[in-house]
Image (cartoon, rainbow, N blue to C red):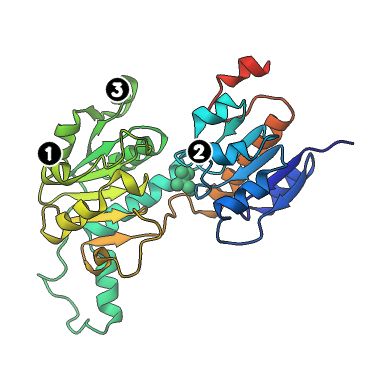
Amino acid sequence: MFKPRVYVTRQIFPDALDLIEKSAELELWPEDQPPSPEQLKEALADVDGAIINVMDHIDASVLEAAPKLRVLSQVAVGLDNIDIPESTKREILVGYTPGVLAKSTADLAFGLLLAVARRVVESDKWVREGNWKISHHPMFWLGSEVNGSTLGILGLGGIGLEMAKRAKGFDMKVLYHSRTRKRELEKEHGFKYASFKRVLADSDFISIHVPLTPETNKFIGEKQLKAMKKSAILVNLSRGPVVDTEALYKALKKSWIAGAGLDVFDPEPVPPEHPILGLDNVVVLPHIGSASNRSRREMHLLAARNLVAGLNGERLEECANPELYESLGI
Ligand code: DGY
């Protein structure tokens, strides 16, 4: 029996691989480091489908080298590494994994917010370095109060919404700015819509949840950082290039803002000698927003189901270019 050929560009949970293997011949990239562009082209040259990752850059030249490709299944909600219009032009369905990672990513965003506000990483380091000599001091390690403060959300999509819900549990006021105003959510949860300018000026914490697009590249630069409160803490779990790294470094160093929690960086990985790592008012994590066992497994399974559905000529559970369904007759 004919089985389509599939390439998986990084290790994934075994039950997701099993699911794919039931209907396809599977080949798996064996390394932890991603394939180079040339290796990626070679890997995709003769396959019908692929499971890919945010580090695999799928541009027109890669698609050109993959003439049989019918389905690209991304293990992520962000799609900035894929040329979607070019995929659509070539009638390649693109799957992705929103939803299943929203709660775990928001958990970590809130964790980062708390960590920076209450100086968790900084004080832990201080203890480990042998500096805890006085049991309790009334004026040591003062941080920012989270409860009762204002959280500004930039981008009220799936993850932004989960972040806003967590803030309500901490009695925070939630302001948001998003491409589309969500009046239902405002009514249901009491979130307040505000202009970009107002969110910057009025928030104690600002959490970024916008996708990376040409419009959001360096969305937060010097001007925006200077427009924030001096006491503001910025949290970024979207994509590194949404924040201008140079400007953020200046803002943290010169105390234009109080701190930052970053799960993403530009560039990634952050070079160990980067000056930002010498600052105490920033916590940097290695892009682990969705890295809980449950979320990652669900992402891998959803990506596998998207892939198999596409290969079987069916609609994907989560598709980034559903406008193709009509021309594909599915
Ligand atoms: C995403 O889903 O876009 C994350 O960045 C990868 O886990």
Instruction: Tell me the crowding category of disc 1: few under 14, some 14 to 19, or many 20 or more residues within 10 angstroms, Cα based.
Output: some
Q: Quadrant of the N terminus?
A: top right
Q: Give the answer, above or below, for where 67 lies relative to 253.
A: above
Amino acid tagged 2: Ile
Amino acid tagged 1: Ala
Tell me if I can see residue 157 in this picture. Answer: yes
Of residue 50 and residue 111, the one placed in the foreground of this image is 50
Amino acid tagged 3: Arg
Q: Quadrant of the C terminus?
A: top right
Residue for point 18% across, 35% down: 199
Disc ID at residue 82: 2
Instruction: Tell me the crowding category of disc 2: few under 14, some 14 to 19, or many 20 or more residues within 10 angstroms, Cα based.
Output: many
Of residue 42 and residue 319, the one placed in the foreground of this image is 42
From mark 2 to mark 3, how far is it between C-alphas?
Answer: 27 Å
Disc ID at residue 36: none
Displayed quadrant of residue 45: top right
Tell me if 201 is positioned left or right of 275 in this view: left
Of residue 97 and residue 81, the one placed in the foreground of this image is 81
From mark 3 to mark 1, how far is it between C-alphas?
Answer: 19 Å
Q: Give the answer, above or below, for where 160 lies relative to 113.
A: above
Instruction: First in sequence, mark 2 or 3: give its number.
Output: 2
Q: Which residue is mark 3?
A: 181
| Residue 96 locus on image (x, y percent) | 55, 36
Q: Which residue is mark 1?
A: 201
CB contact under 8 Å: marks 2 and 3:
no
From mark 1 to mark 2, how far is it between C-alphas?
Answer: 34 Å
Instruction: Tell me the crowding category of disc 3: few under 14, some 14 to 19, or many 20 or more residues within 10 angstroms, Cα based.
Output: some
Q: Secondary structure at mark 1?
A: helix
| Residue 288 locus on image (x, y percent) | 44, 55
Tell me if 40 is positioned left or right of 278 in this view: right
Instruction: First in sequence, mark 1 or 2: give its number.
Output: 2
Residue for point 58% across, 41% down: 62
